[in-house]
Amino acid sequence: MQDVTNFAELVRRAASARGTRPALRSHATVITWSELDQQVDAVAANLAALGLPADEHGAARVAVALPNVPEFAAVFFGVLRAGLVAVPINPAYTARELAHVFADSGAAVLVGTQSVVSAVGAGGPSRQYTLGGNLQELFQDKAGPALAGGAGLAVLLYTSGTAGAPKGAMLSHRALLANHGQLAELDPPPVAPDDVLLLAVPLFHAYGLNSGLGAVAYHGACGVLVERFDPADSLEVIERHGVTGVVGVPPMFIAWSLMGERLTEAWAGVRLAVCGASPLDAAAERRFVEATGQPVHQGYGLTEAAPVVTSTLASATVKSGSIGRAIPGVELKLIDAGGEEVLLDEDDEVRTDPGEIVVRGRNLFDGYWPSGEGAPDADGWWATGDVAYADEDGDLFIVDRLGELILVSGFNVYPHEIELVLAAHPAVVEAAALGVPHPYTGQTVKVVVVRRPGSQVTAEELIAHCERNLARFKCPTAVEFVDELPHSATGKIRKAALR
């Protein structure tokens, strides 16, 4: 999109072309594109009037700790239109987690819920605006010149990571815009101006922020905001608002897949289902497809890639468990431990050897805040830390995170493989595999399991099940039963918390 350099210009463009059309729906509230554009102008003008100085790291940062409410969109785009940097934050963060993000980002302003503002107290930014309180000050019309923002750093998104404290991924306006341009090159494009997208994935996450809200703005479509996901309520929302596209995560599709005829009825008008953030359970996928008659398009992405890298929308067919192929404009290769590419062999036939996913594209980030460490190399390539293999058609399948690789007597063990085997057991709801120290093998496998209600399956039975499906060195030697596993906002198991 040559005419847009600041991400907030998407709102102005949509208002110009589709001003009276709904931009956002939330419960009974409907906000048109013209109304949203006016709100963005007001927020930008009021933030600009604060006179926030740039520091040695550039434009001032504004933390946005809000749920999926219309105010999030107005504030987010208003920050960008004011030429500032947005720092979306999970409003469910604890005081300790909030303190880390504020200290690391140096945010000068906080826009948050009452619980966030209370948790931060005097230890947060000096300027604080509260949802349901003084936040309305930012929405008051303020005379002043029209603002267009800048074209550099747009967003700091803090990644959960597999170890250590979260780091801020620096995403530019270019990267955010590029990912939509890349997806729009798919044939047919996944989103059109007349679409109504369900926005239930948290907007503070790269997936909800750009693949959800960003897609709505890029295409001038309509977004239906859901603050807290409930399977039954969300199906009612889908029906009532005429949702045509769903941007979702595995826990959503798993819950829907258990709702039988109700899912079939509600999904009658939906034409596109996209699932990301983590792999979708194969059994849940089958149930969903049987109920709706349409596929769940899965993909792969990272915060650092703004976020989409691959999708089954780019594949000839949708295969269960596959993350598809690289979307247009994204280059991808698989690299083995020796640094050699394994995607193609000398006969140009696809190899099934796993390798680390390495990518290149205009959607990549500029490194981690504030120094830019971890940025793509001089040739634009960035190693993701994720391991995948390609089948004979070139479709990709995730194996695991390199950082979560378990080494048993020198042999590579991928936790995801063990978790898939356990998930196939009828008594298992969910499982996580971890590497733990072992005096003879270096590491051994321990699994943490959530049993189905009423099940009395034993550790011995689950180990035996694994032994029937896995090489012995991959099998767990310890099983711990828990009532639930810790998850991130997008449904990923938080293995750092388990460790």
Image: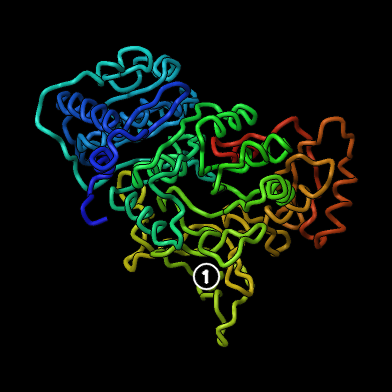
Farthest residue, direction bottom: 347
Q: Which colour scheme is used?
A: rainbow
Q: Tell me where residue 41 sits by quadrant.
A: top left
Residue 241 left/right relative to 4: right
Residue 312 left/right relative to 474: left
Q: Is residue 200 above or below residue 193?
A: above
Farthest residue, direction left: 145
Residue 229 left/right relative to 136: right
Number of numbered discs present? 1
Q: Can residue 399 be seen in this view?
A: yes
- Residue 357, image x and y in percent? 51, 63
Q: Which of 235 and 442 is in front in this view?
A: 235
Quadrant of the snapshot with the C terminus:
top right
Residue 432 left/right relative to 77: right
Q: Nearer the viewer, residue 163 or 481?
A: 481
Tell me the element at label 1: strand
Q: Can residue 495 be seen in this view?
A: no
How crowded is the residue under tag 1: few (<14 C-alpha within 10 Å), some, or many (20+)?
A: many
- Residue 221, image x and y in percent? 38, 42
Q: Mark 1 points at which residue?
A: 335
Q: Is residue 137 above or below residue 199?
A: above
- Residue 445, image x and y in percent? 74, 51
Who's the residue at 64% across and 28% down the image?
A: 232
Q: What residue type is labelled 1?
A: Ile
Q: In this view, does 35 lie above or below 349?
A: above
Quadrant of the snapshot with the N terminus:
bottom left
Q: Tell me where residue 63 sits by quadrant.
A: top left
Q: Which of 427 and 243 is in front in this view?
A: 243
- Residue 168, image x and y in percent? 38, 42
Who's the residue at 17% across and 28% down the image?
A: 48
